[in-house]
Amino acid sequence: MKTMLILMHRHQKLFFKDKGMFLSSLITPVILIVLYMTFLDQIYHNNFVAYMPKNFSLPDCIINATIASQLVASLLAVTCVTVTFSVNMTMVQDYALGIRKDFDVSPVKKSILYLSYLFATIFNSLIVNMIALILGLVYIASRGWYLQFGDVLYLIGDVILLVMFGAVLSGIVCFPLRTQGARNAVGTIVSAGYGFLCGAYMPLHYFGTTLQKVMSFFPSTYATSLLKNHFLERPFIKMQEAGVPKAVIHEIAISLDCKPKFMGYLVRTEMMVLMLVVATIVLCILYLFLSQHASKR
């Protein structure tokens, strides 16, 4: 345990020492917030208003709070995973710079070394994504605040769970990489495509039926839905109090992927959490298996 803690501290120092990497990881959520506000805010607003009954006026504060919550949920669904690929650069960098040769001849077990990479990635990614969560909550507060203390605790738990899932996933994907160019290429591909695969950029409601069924097998789908449910629960309650019919709120929730289905069955938030926990455990077992294989090799 002491050896792993020392290695974790070493990986963390290397990450924060690289100011360019740290600032690029930190500024990514800020850039996404600005892009979401610029290009998606009006689109989400028009789609939301289209669901309202005719001759029904809903207070702007509820509309703005709902849209802001949707934007921030989509943002965190992306950054909690993609940032881990940027943070998990030490493992590849050690290979690229030849530092792994020193570790290979040392008495440190390979499983301990790879676990130190994993835990350092989780810790560093949590710092970045907690800052992103705070910025998102500030943005929501500027548009319309209905969240309660318990909701914020749920959101913190969601971020921790998603970061752990993303860290293990990035560890497996980056495991065979040996050059910085390969890592940068993988990071670019993940950053560009993950938002579509998890339904953050565009709700799965707008995809074809076949594609929806395929994506229902991806844990990332339920990660996005979990965040949206916890962000939008209070605005939905305020809509109902304002007189919006339950059927309309239900349709809005479906359109925002708050009520995903798996094999035709509705997936509730408890099952989403369970799916993500199971997926993280399975990926962690695979990651440990790969580290053991590397040790034997």
Image: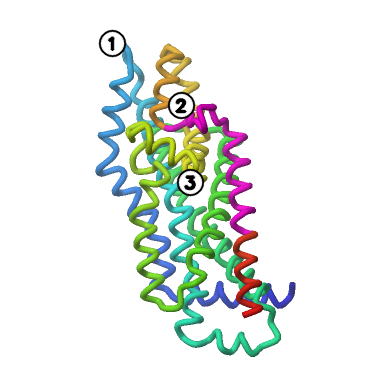
Are there few (<14), some (14-19), or many (20+) residues within 10 Å of tag 3?
many
Which badge, 1 or 3, is on the more N-terminal residue? 1
Which secondary structure, mark 2?
Answer: helix
Q: Magenta stretch containing residue 33, yes or no?
A: no
- Disc nearest the viewer among 1 and 3: 3
Question: Where does label 3 land, which residue?
Answer: 220
Question: Where does label 1 land, which residue?
Answer: 54
At label 2, the amino acid type is Pro
Q: Nearer the viewer, residue 6 or 97?
A: 97
- Which residue shows up at 60% across the image and 45% down it? 157
Q: Quadrant of the C terminus?
A: bottom right
- Which residue shows up at 48% across the image and 29% down it? 259
- Which residue shows up at 52% across the image and 38% down it? 226
At label 1, the amino acid type is Lys
Q: Nearer the viewer, residue 221 or 67?
A: 221
- Disc nearest the viewer among 3 and 2: 3
**Numbered-mark total:** 3
Left or right, 127 with reference to 73: right
Are there few (<14), some (14-19), or many (20+) residues within 10 Å of tag 1?
few
Task: Check the image and tell me how it is coloured.
Answer: rainbow
Residue 26, horizontal then vertical, whole percent: 42, 61
Left or right, 70 with reference to 272: left
Which secondary structure, mark 1?
Answer: loop
Q: CA distance from mark 1 to mark 3?
A: 36 Å
Left or right, 264 with reference to 195: right
Question: Quarter-wise, where is residue 164 in the image?
Answer: bottom right
Label annotation for residue 44: none
Question: Where does label 2 land, which residue?
Answer: 235
At label 3, the amino acid type is Ser
- Disc nearest the viewer among 2 and 1: 1
Which badge, 3 or 2, is on the more N-terminal residue? 3
